[in-house]
Image: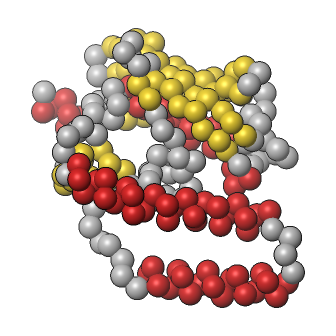
Amino acid sequence: MRESFAEISADEHDRLHALYGPLTTAVRKLVDASIRTGVDDQVIRDAQAAIEAVTATLESRQYEGPRTLRHAVTGRPVVWADPAIGLRNAIAPPLDVQHTEDGRCWTEFTLGARYEGPPDRVHGGICALVLDHVLGEVASEGLVKPRFTGTLTLKYLRGTPLGPLRAEAWIDRTEGVKAFARGRILDAEGVTVEAEGIFVMPAWAREAG
């Protein structure tokens, strides 16, 4: 099925970004705090009641429209709910992906307690999420060309530590409707995970020419 996104103006995008960005940041801090807290039992119960009250307030009016829009100026999808880059998704680190003139992309980000798998290490599935996204970004030329993950293969060289990290991706080659991308995650000491993926243009995009 062909994807069709409603358009959002630059001004409205900026307004919503300024409104919801701080809310999502606050929720991220709440999740980290709930993992690390050592306060007394009654404080936990009081906090739970307060959180439930705020949740009920936000649930009192839910938006039922599309969660993915298209920016009127850049043409990029505006993916509020995306678990890698979504402005309104507290699960997202979030990734702020930068593109270079030679067709590569990169992002620097920090993963804290809510992404922990082994002690003091990032869960392997989170590494896969990050690499799937950055490889997809480079394969789709910044999310403007429809190319979706066909296969993704990861090689874990060593544990990825919690803290500041960098992810990079580039196109290895293209063959018809397929783009072959490579990428990696690095910490201060070097590469921790390598990835390669095949990203495929869907049938509806091929038919559209």
Residue 51 visible somewhere in the drawing: yes
- Residue in the image at 87% along x and 81% along y: 40
The x, y position of residue 137, in whole percent, is: 41, 31
Residue 5 is at least partly visible in this image: no
In which image quadrant can residue 73 be found? Answer: top left
Measured as percent of width and height from the top left, residue 18 is found at 39, 58
Residue drawn at x 54%, y 51% as measured from the top left:
92
Relative placement, left or right, of 193 versus 130 is right
How has the structure been colored for display?
Answer: secondary structure
What residue is rendered at 73% in x and 65% in y?
33
Q: Is 73 rendered above or below residue 53?
A: above
The quarter of the picture where the C terminus appears is top left
Using residue 16 as the reference point, say whether residue 39 is left or right of it. Answer: right
At horizontal 36% and vertical 50% (from top left) the residue drawn is: 79
Estimate the x, y position of residue 48 in percent, counting from the top left: 68, 83
| Relative to 127, 2 lies left or right | left
Across and down, in percent, residue 171 comes to 43, 16
Using the image, determine if residue 197 lies above or below residue 7: above
Relative to the observer, which residue lies in front, 199 or 106?
A: 106
